[in-house]
Amino acid sequence: MAKSKWAVDSAHSSIDFSVKHMMVAKVKGSFNSFEGSAEADTDDLTTADVAFNIDVNSIDTRNADRDAHLKASDFFDVENYPTITFKSTDITKKGANEYDMTGDLTLHGTTRPETFALTFEGEVKDPMSGKEKAGFSGETKIKRSDFGLTWNAALETGGVMLGDEIKISIEIEATKEA
């Protein structure tokens, strides 16, 4: 099968994250505005080219004050770094429908290789639109300090306000383009 162009259906997709807060809990959030595309043969995803752009200003942790702080210069500094991007560089098959997708993640002005554990959930024809749809799930962990995101505060009882490790989870529904 030949490669086809696919576009992320953001209404049926999500990009979520979590971080340890005050050493005892996790805070979760999402990015609500993003776009992505792929050129892929769903029978052989190892040859796919995948790209994502995330609007950092769309961060949503269900707390307006926290979101404002995350957008400020202590963290994402959206005025200077309004987008997070990902561009795949290598995809390796790990098992039936399981892949490692490595690519260049650019966050806060720093680009680093990061790898997502990716699951191909399948392909189906949408009965409403008649278009082909494909589903993907993925996750990775990154260190925010690797991207220059180092703001923190010490706790009286020891430890720090925020963990360094960020867990990122993606759920993607893509539509095959004509």
Image (cartoon, helix red, strand yellow):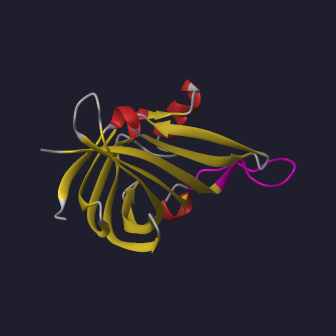
Q: Is residue 80 visible?
A: no
Q: Position of residue 44 (x, y in %)?
A: 30, 68
Q: How many numbered discs sit on the rendered protein?
A: 0
Magenta: predominant secondary structure element?
loop
> Which residue does the image show at 46% across and 60% down from the upper left?
118
Relative to 8, 117 lies left or right: right
* Residue lying at 79% horizontally and 55% vertically, measured from the top left: 159
The answer to whether residue 7 is visible is yes
Decide which of 177, 165 is in the foreground and name it.
Answer: 177
Residue 21 or 136: which is nearer the viewer? Answer: 136
Magenta stretch, residue numbers: 150-163
Picture layout, residue 34 above or below residue 104: above
152 in the magenta segment: yes
Residue for point 18% across, 62% down:
3
Instruction: From the viewer's side, name the closer residue of 134 and 68.
Output: 134
Q: Residue furthest top?
A: 64
Q: Residue 60 magenta-drawn?
A: no
The percent position of residue 117, horizontal first and vertical second, equals: 49, 63
- Quarter holding the C terminus? top left
Q: Residue furthest right?
A: 157
Residue 95 horizontal side relative to residue 7, left or right:
right
Report the residue at 40% width, 69% height from top.
102
Q: Is residue 73 left or right of residue 29?
A: left
Image quadrant holding the N terminus, namely bottom left
Q: Nearer the viewer, residue 154 or 13?
A: 13
Image: 40 above or below 93: above
Q: Give the image location of residue 6, x and y in percent.
A: 23, 49
